[in-house]
Amino acid sequence: MSDSLQIARILLSRLQPFSYCAIDLTDPETGDPLTDVCLLGVDDAGKSVLLSQLCHSVDLAVPPDVPDPASAREALVLTQFKWNDRLVYQARRGSPRQNSPADVLWLNESVHEIDGWHDLGENPPGFDEFRERFGHCGLGEDEVPPQPPRAFFGADSSLVDSCDTKTLHAFLESIVDEREREYRSFLELPENRERTVAEAEEEFETARPSLLPVLQDLWSSMLHKPIRINPEKCAVSPAADVAARGAQSLLLRTGCLLRQCFRRPDEAGFLFLDEPETGLHPAAALNVVKLYRSILGTRRTQLFAATHSPLIASQFSPQQRVRLGSGDGDRVAASRGIAPEGSDPNQILKRDFEIEEALGKKTSSVEQTLQAGRAAHDIDEQDEDELADLIDEASWVRKP
């Protein structure tokens, strides 16, 4: 079994808009890190800043559209991870664009015993001060967690394992090129030199199935109509069905995530979604988290989403919703969701977003508005099960 790495807590000190904020990301009943987390709050509460810092904790390659406050260079970001059965800490500077491996410090659990550890909030330190006080508890290079699979999907970027893919055509082109390279390498293996081309091709297709048929089935299931991928043109048809920017973006992101799962099927990872509702029909937004989860399957992936949408927030339980708002003085405070599990988006909007009746007084009106769209946009459970089986089968065959 591969390493399991999950974020349990994060502390932001001297980072705007967080003067000092310690955020617990564990299940209050079990104490384990939450598998799914939704960040919500008013504008300028710090949702995107927090999401980018969570992302940066597992990947120093930063998406180009994440915020980088002027205060970040001197700020401290302290992340607690649960790594298999132990706790480890990562301390680093808050600036995503000015960080380097030298500015990242990994600490072991003995840091708890040092004077001042439990009083950080009384006099919030910057990174340099923190390193001076606690740096001697650092982990050795061979004790640092390995780089996990990770994906960040923001408004203007799709970054998967540090690689940015801009367009659907470029994504399909990279799959076709990679497939051709794999086939040429396969033909050069000593055991294939005496085989005919037909025999080698059959063995290659059996041992290393193509991603394109699985991808085609996924996209057809999402759009509820047959989609065809043309490997020669690196294009999708009918083109009219994927012409909308929102549709192209969702196809690209789901495709990138599926390819990552294909390549690294057994590894625990992270998925970060910044405003995943952008460009989507409301009924599609109501099911987008379920869609991503169906692609991830049983892979132990921690999912974080920052949103302005009650449709997205309604897909998370109260303990999974983290509300950012005003605290004491100039500090941002974090609290859990208020609306109970099973609440519709109208109740989420009223209680968690604290907006009174913006969608109308009758809760049922929201449901009625969305029901017609669900029939066209929801993921059919049978299709979802069949797709999951196909992904699992293809991933299993690819294992050495």
Image: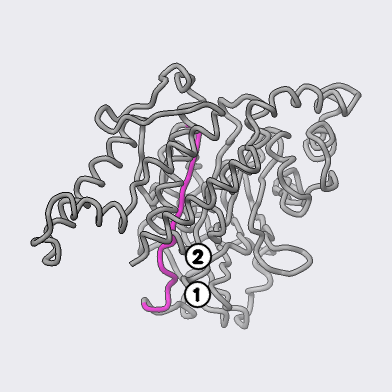
Q: Label 2 sits on what residue type? A: Ala
362 shown above or below 264:
above
Q: Quadrant of residue 325?
A: top right
Disc 1 or 2, which lies upstream in sequence? 2
Instruction: Look at the numbered disc 1 and give the secondary structure of its residue.
Output: strand
Residue 375, position as x, y percentages in the image: 69, 27
Residue 184 appears at what percent x and percent y?
15, 51
* Badge 1 vs badge 2, beta-carbon distance below 8 Å: yes
Reply yes or no: does residue 146 show up in magenta. yes
User: Residue at the location (86% across, 21% down)?
Assistant: 360
Q: From the viewer's perspective, tell me whether residue 367 is left or right of residue 194.
A: right
Front residue of 61 and 175: 175
Q: Which mark is residue 107?
A: 1
Residue 211: mark in rendering: none
Numbered disc total: 2
Please tell me whether mark 2 sits on a helix, a strand or a loop. strand
* Label 2, residues with CA under 10 Å away: few <14, some 14-19, many ≥20: many
Spot the residue most to the top. 240
Q: Amino acid at mark 1?
A: Leu
Residue plotted at (49% across, 53% down): 94
Task: Write the residue at 67% across / 28% down.
Answer: 283
Report the Cα–Cα distance between label 1 and label 2.
Answer: 8 Å
Q: Could you tell me residue 292's position as x and y percent?
A: 56, 44
In the image, residue 18 above or below residue 191: above
The stretch of residues the image draws in magenta is 142-155
Q: Which residue is mark 2?
A: 91
Can residue 51 be seen by looking at this rendering?
A: no
Instruction: Give the side of residue 83 with respect to residue 191, left or right.
Output: right
x, y percentage for residue 342?
82, 44
- Few, some or many residues within 10 Å of mark 1 (<14, 14–19, 20+): many
